[in-house]
């Protein structure tokens, strides 16, 4: 693996104050392959939260679940630094934080090291030209699948109906009904559907539709994951085997206050695919 160049952000140095439990993605001492040793001996599973922001949500859950080890990732220095301060103040031993990009996740964990991955309210990148930035894409999900133990899960939550449908399409699932959502009402999506940019993201338009925001199904993803469960939230079954269900993220609370629905998708890494992801 190519080393990641170090950032010149002023908070890079400040984060070093918390080197006992927080790292930058370029640090050589991230306990990759050794997270079980970093966490207390009683740790039963390891959870990786992508886009943890200031780790308030993660710390709340970590306090309530001392036998779970949590690793939070965010690419914003300042919020991650606040999270590192919080962990120190609360003396939490079961949380580690990384300042970095999800795209570099293979620098943070070795294969089969993680039990659960949480991706809650990631940026929806709703305009057609931005769709390629979505975290829930084939390349990213295959990379994350390698870090998951066979039988591990990805939990995804979003407030964005189009993103919810997008993940269904990736897995060849019928598009769910999502209330009043009309992608064609979004001028940028509408204009983009007719532009060359659509061809670049290789979007197949369903017959008779201008849905330029829907990706083609991925055969690889369908092999690696089982599309286990999807629902409008709150839903009892969603995340029922995990420990986050009684806690809401910052964004979730904001959307709820505004009366907006949330959506959840649960993906199970197929045990059978354990040795076949490299195919
Ligand atoms: C919309 S916020 C959601 C925060 C939190 N999960 C919640 O539900 O309240 C998305 C977070 O993901 C982080 N983020 C966005 N793209 C990222 C990337 N490529 N790698 C790591 N973090 C990223 C942002 O910095 C931001 O804190």
Image (cartoon, grey):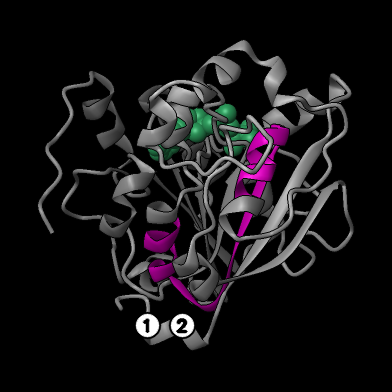
Q: Foreground: 10 or 127?
A: 127
Q: Is residue 79 visible?
A: no
Residue depicted at x 41% and y 72%: 113
Q: Left or right: 123 with respect to 198?
A: right
The stretch drawn in magenta includes residue 199: no
Q: Mark 2: few, some, or many residues within 10 Å (few <14, many ≥20)?
A: some
Q: Residue 276: give its label.
A: 1
Q: Quadrant of the N terminus?
A: bottom left
Q: Foreground: 120 or 161?
A: 161
Q: Left or right: 269 with respect to 104?
A: right
Q: Quadrant of the C terminus?
A: bottom left
Disc 1 is placed on an element classified as: loop
Q: Position of residue 216 (x, y in %)?
A: 52, 51
The magenta region covers 141-167
The stretch drawn in magenta includes residue 147: yes
Q: Residue 273: give its label.
A: 2
Q: Are marks 2 and 1 in contact (CB under 8 Å)?
A: yes
Q: Left or right: 111 with respect to 72?
A: left
């Amino acid at each position: 693996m190519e080393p990641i160049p170090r950032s010149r952000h002023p908070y890079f140095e400040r984060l070093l104050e918390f080197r006992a439990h927080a790292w930058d993605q370029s640090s050589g001492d991230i306990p990759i392959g050794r997270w079980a040793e970093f966490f207390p001996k009683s740790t039963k599973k390891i959870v990786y939260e992508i886009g943890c922001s200031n780790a308030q949500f993660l710390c709340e859950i970590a306090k309530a679940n001392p036998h779970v080890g949590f690793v939070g990732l965010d690419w914003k220095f300042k919020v991650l630094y606040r999270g590192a301060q919080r962990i120190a103040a609360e003396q939490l031993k079961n949380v580690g934080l990384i300042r970095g990009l999800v795209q570099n996740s293979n620098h943070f964990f070795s294969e089969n090291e993680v039990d659960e991955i949480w991706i809650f309210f990631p940026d929806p990148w709703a305009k057609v030209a931005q769709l390629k930035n979505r975290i829930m894409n084939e390349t990213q999900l295959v990379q994350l699948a390698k870090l998951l133990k066979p039988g591990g899960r990805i939990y995804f939550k979003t407030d964005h109906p189009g993103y919810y449908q997008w993940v269904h399409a990736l897995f060849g699932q019928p598009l769910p009904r999502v209330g009043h959502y009309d992608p064609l009402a979004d001028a940028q999506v509408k204009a983009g559907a007719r532009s060359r940019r659509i061809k670049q993201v290789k979007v197949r338009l369903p017959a008779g539709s201008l849905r330029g925001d829907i990706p083609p199904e991925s055969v690889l993803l369908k092999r690696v994951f089982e599309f286990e469960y999807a629902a409008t939230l709150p839903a009892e079954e969603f995340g029922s085997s995990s420990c986050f269900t009684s806690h809401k993220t910052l964004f979730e609370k904001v959307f709820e206050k505004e009366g907006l629905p949330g959506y959840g998708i649960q993906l199970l890494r197929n045990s059978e695919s354990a040795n076949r992801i490299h195919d």
